[in-house]
Amino acid sequence: MGISSKYYFSDFTLDNYKRILSIASRNYSFRFFNEEFIDKSIILRHDLEFSIPTALKMAQIEAEFGIKATYFVQLHSEFYNTLERASIISIKEISNLGHQIGLHFDTHFWNIKTERQLDKHLLIDKNIIEKYTGFKIKDANTKQCGGYGEPKGDGSHFFMQFHRPLKRPFFYTFSCKIAAKVGRYTAKCP
């Protein structure tokens, strides 16, 4: 059995994504990270690791169902350039569909070792994206799990939100990253 068969890669299609969102949109409300979380809510987020054009297709599908999500873009991606004209146009279209844009921060790029370094470099990346794209970045998450790029080992995800007018530049919360485990997923919702 090959790896794609073993993990049902063929299930991960835009058609199946649309089918799952159709069911979820009838049973749940979708919220942003900075909104109050209520019962039967989903906070939908996407870490843009590889393809902004695919992210745009997903955002269009979500918009068909009135679903909102946060799309976390990388400034230091090996697969796309956030500041390239085509990327900016696509990300603006994602935003215009009603989605939020966040920063997918790479702690290893900056070799983060301290909280002070984290604060400094998060602000640098946030300001670059805002200056050159015009996006208002409200949320950020780290590209690697765990604080300062080190995995916590329990599957938790280090998540940060930008809030003002706090004395510190960032407000940190820890939350469990909600993601499908590798393997077959279904459209059944609890």
Image: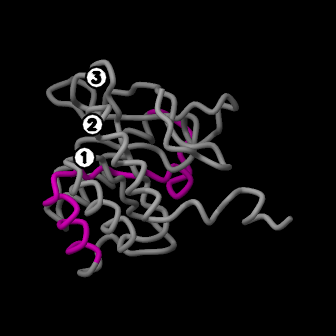
**Mark 2, secondary structure of its residue:** strand
Tell me the residue at 51%/50% (across/down): 143
Which element is circle 3 on? Answer: loop
Q: Position of residue 20 (x, y in %)?
A: 42, 48
State which tag comes first along the sequence, 1 or 3.
3
Q: Which residue is mark 2?
A: 30
Q: Is residue 136 left or right of residue 140?
A: left
Near-viewer residue (140 or 68): 68
Q: Which corner quadrant holds the N terminus? A: bottom right
Asked if the residue at tag 1 contacts the one at tag 2, i.e. Cβ–Cβ closer than 8 Å, the answer is yes
Specify few, some or many for label 2: CA neighbours under 10 Å numbering under 14, 14-19, or 20 or more. Answer: some
- Give residue 128's quadrant in the image: bottom left
Marking on residue 67: 1
**Residue with the mark numbered 3:** 37
Label 1–label 3 contact, CB within 8 A:
no
Span highlighted in magenta in the image = 87-115
Name above or below for residue 18 compared with residue 142: below
